[in-house]
Amino acid sequence: MEGRAGSRDSRAGLLETIRVRRGAIEAYVHEQRPASTRLSTISIISSSVAAALTAGPAFGGTRFADNVKEGLSLEQTSQVWQVLCLGALVVSVTAAVSAQLNKANDLTSRIGAAEAAGVMLDGLRTRLEYGRLPVKEGAEEYQDIVAGIPFVHAGPTDPASGTSGAATSRRRRPAGAWVLGVVAVLAVLLLAAALLGLVRGLAGSSTDPGAGQPRSADARTTPAGPITVPSHDTVDGTVLLGAGAGWGSPTSGCSASTTSADPSECPAPAGAAPRVEGTGP
């Protein structure tokens, strides 16, 4: 009777140990899977944004910078280049750090090993409860399973909540992943601002197609001022001479196109030189 009672106690103790370890595995997977997903997502987004930030200056050149400057109302074109290059540098470092953290912790393989160990512990518990597996063999198998997941620690059970210490560790989130996420979000906002400036700059240039274009070298400008009329005119072979405003000038009241045969029809202006009549060639 005492031997059977001791065997039952050993079996119950092993089942309780398996239950606590199974809870620790669930807590570990529940905590590390989102962390691994966040780091992978941040790395992918950061790499893409870094490439997009450098694509505009690389392919658009000075025209891209000018359009963004006009769209965002910046003072200098160099500000566009400096901000985009600095943003690409920061987000590239963010992508590298995220990928390295995910690789260094080896989260993907650890999560897979923990899930596999949890499945094997469930099978062991079922055989102990219903398959009449000897306690000694069950304990040995349990040790073999646990040896494959040394990174999962079964802490003491919290009597108030019934959860293990590993489950309570979910409350402690590393700040590094969140910082990297904030940097990635800021980089996305910078890219959106650059695209907005480009669109506004292109829209402004399309509404004013002549703006910013140099004047043609063949363009001729007409100087402002009065037109000088020659001081002598010929009307039907008669040469009209005058100084300054003479007969036939615009100020004499008689048009230069006057075809009258009698020059006396054009009154002499005040202060004009004497009129000399003669026959032209």
Image (spheres, grey):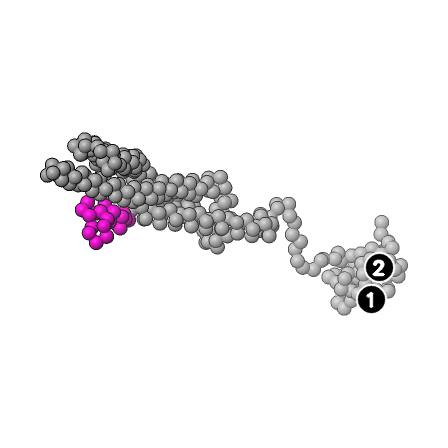
Position of 193 relative to 225 (above/below): above
User: Going by the image, does 109 lie left or right of 239?
Assistant: left
The residue at the point 61 percent across, 45 percent down is 217
Provide the residue designation for mark 2: 258
Amino acid type shown at disc 1 = Pro
Q: Secondary structure at mark 2?
A: loop
Q: Nearer the viewer, residue 115 or 90?
A: 115
Q: Is residue 21 above or below residue 189?
A: above
159 in the magenta segment: yes
Determine the secondary structure under disc 1. loop
Which residue: 78% across, 67% down?
Answer: 269
Q: Toward which corner of the image does residue 117 lie, by quadrant?
A: top left
Q: Are marks 2 and 1 in contact (CB under 8 Å)?
A: no
Q: CA distance from mark 2 to mark 1?
A: 13 Å
Farthest residue, direction left: 2
**Residue 37 location, x and y as percent?**
35, 42
Q: Is residue 63 located in the magenta-colored stretch of the structure?
A: no
Of residues 48 and 90, the one drawn nearer to the viewer in this rendering:
48
Number of residues whose C-alpha sits closer than 10 Å to that of mark 2, classed few (under 14), some (14–19) or many (20 or more)? some
Query: How many residues crowd mark 1 within 10 Å: few (<14), some (14–19), many (20+)?
Result: few
- Can see residue 37? yes
Please state the extent of the stretch shown in magenta in the rendering.
Answer: 155-175
Q: Magenta-highlighted stretch: main secondary structure?
A: loop
Relative side of 115 to 192, left or right: left
> Residue 72, how many percent across, how many down?
48, 53
Q: Which residue is mark 1?
A: 267
